[in-house]
Image (spheres, coloured by chain):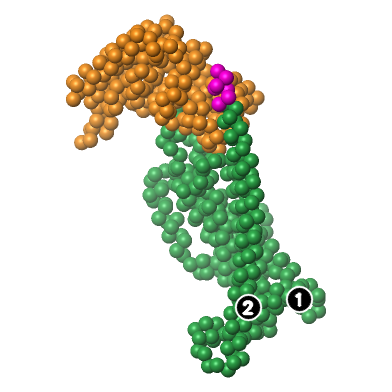
Amino acid sequence: MSSRVEVAGVSKLFNAGRPNEVQALSHITLAIEANEFVSLIGPSGCGKSTLLRCIAALTDATEGSITVAGKSAEQARVDQDYGMAFQKAGLFDWRTVAKNIELPLELMGWKKADRARRATEMLRLVQLDEFGDHRPAELSGGMQQRVAIARALSFEPSLLLMDEPFGALDEMTREHMQAELLRIWRSTDTTVVFVTHSIPEAVFLSTRVIVMSPRPGRIATEIRVDLGDRDDDTRQDPAFFKLVTEVREALRSVEDSAG
Amino acid sequence: MTGASDALARRQRLADEQRAFERREATSRAVRSAVIFVAFIVVLGLGYSGYKAFGTSIDDAQTDWPVVGSFLPATDDLRMPPALDIITEFGEPLQRNSDRPLALFILDAALFTLRETVVGLLGGIVLGLAVAVALLRSRRLERGLLPWVVVSQTIPLIAVAPIVVIWGRNNFGFLPFAWADWMSVSVIAVYLSFFPVAINGLRGLQSPAPDDLELMNSYAASWTATLFKLRFPAALPYLFPAVRLAATASVVGAIVGEISAGVQGGLGRLILDFASRYTTGPERLYDAVIGAALLGIAIIVVLTLLERLTLASRQGTTAP
């Protein structure tokens, strides 16, 4: 079976041809298989968010090609092959929680009853059954982020793109959300590309961690994470610590060489 | 697991309590505003009567105090009819051969002006939104058209009003309905009221965060879908204050429009009539002005209630 996401020789220039030209990405090549959970990690300015945006076709690659589910990234965006979650939950405060989840379905022209049924299912998936009629402002940050994930998954995309979705949460909520995300990932048939700058988060969640280096953004190294099924005990596992150390050292050498 | 569901239940309870609290708050806020309004009217009446009594007592004492009647208004009954007379005049008949009280004449005129105002306001909202959307759609248009929108408001209303009425009488024959003079006054009200809606509407339509726009983009939402699902709802907290301003402008436009274009039937004309016959009944002019003020207040109250109802569910969303 072909990769879910294929990034081939992608470079990205901002302000191309002008004095303030910045090379954000340089010749990135990356293949992501179905049902992988891939984290992109690196110091700020390494272009990890830019790479995610290129995959989402929210911005164009200057050079190279990106294929998502066998088609161009742009076509995949138009066909709604991916769902996206940002650092800010970005719920619309004039809509109830359930109506927020229904937003992409509305845009896709789903019938009202179908939308409502799916919203109920998604609320159950993220364990917020009782909160469909609530306003986003009545929810905690972690709960809002769960709603955002439910919204991203509501139309069952095969690919979930997440840009530091837990970056604004406190440590306890964050760990809870990570466990939740893994449960959701296992119970759905989804491939995840996850941008983070937290090393334990990347290791805990991923099947593969891509370490990127800055100026210009390149893939420095990638680390396979073979931890199998994880739970909260995994965080105390020596194998977990070993992988965390491995990623940390990779990041250090990246920063030193960029220094 | 029970810990987590306990936490959820607690949050649910908190949210319910919060809502109940906000409902109580809203009720007591309405009562408070009504009390403040009545108190304001009483204070105004007392101040008026107090000043009049003060000025009259000085007059009676034959003191040659140069302030009252020179720097400050004189207090004789022609210039300052007694407050009680102003109130009782509402019940007095306006014409000798009829016992129809003045209040009903003012009410009729107010309803006539209200129609002009509401039509003008609705037209202003539609035109203002259309301008805002056009300016949003095209950067170049925003740069080219926005200055002219601002310039349009510097043209004196009194100069334009008669032209609009004359145009209305002569040039709108192609319309499927007969053009009445009050519609020309509504056009003048549109001219005044579209401006705040256009300016604030544009700001509101531009208010969504880049993240929100990117989210819509990730759904491959069309420009129109983004307009209706994101930009319009996001603009509402900006639009309500603008519509309140537009409503005030629309009342002013209607009354001044009536006066300067000589349109019969509304408060503007009534004020003009009572002013020209001031010496035979000064109280009537005061009453007509009070009627105009009440009309403006009534419109604002209705709009504020609409705003509360619409935005009540959005917590933490206040217009900047």
Up the image or down, B185 lies above or below B9; here it is below
Rendered location of residue A15, percent (x, y):
27, 33
Residue at the location (55% across, 53% down)?
B243
Q: Residue under circle 1?
A: B92
Residues packed near mark 2 inside 10 Å, few (<14), some (14 to 19) or many (20 plus): some
- In the rendered image, what is the letter of the chain coloured green? B
Query: Between residues A9 and A82, which one lies in front from this camera angle?
Result: A82
Chain letter behind tag 2 = B
Rendered location of residue B16, percent (x, y):
62, 35
| Amino acid at pointer 2 | Ser
- Mark positioned earlier in the residue sequence (1 or 2): 2
**Most frequent secondary structure within the magenta stretch:** helix
Up the image or down, A200 lies above or below B238; here it is above
- Write down the colour of chain A: orange
Q: Give the range drawn in magenta.
A: B1-7
Decide if residue A175 is on the left or right side of residue B114: left
Q: How many labels does the image show?
A: 2
Residue at the location (46% across, 60% down)?
B152
Please tell me whether residue B144 belongs to the stretch shown in magenta.
Answer: no
Q: Which structural element holds mark 2?
A: helix
Q: Which of the 4 image quarters holds residue B90?
A: bottom right
Query: Between residues B260 and A3, which one lies in front from this camera angle?
Result: A3
| Amino acid at pointer 1 | Glu
Q: Residue under circle 2?
A: B49
Query: Between residues B146 and A227, which one lies in front from this camera angle?
Result: A227
Pointers 1 and 2 in contact (C-beta within 8 Å): no
Q: Is residue A146 visible?
A: yes
C-alpha span from label 1 to label 2: 21 Å
Decide if residue B252 is on the left or right side of residue A160: right
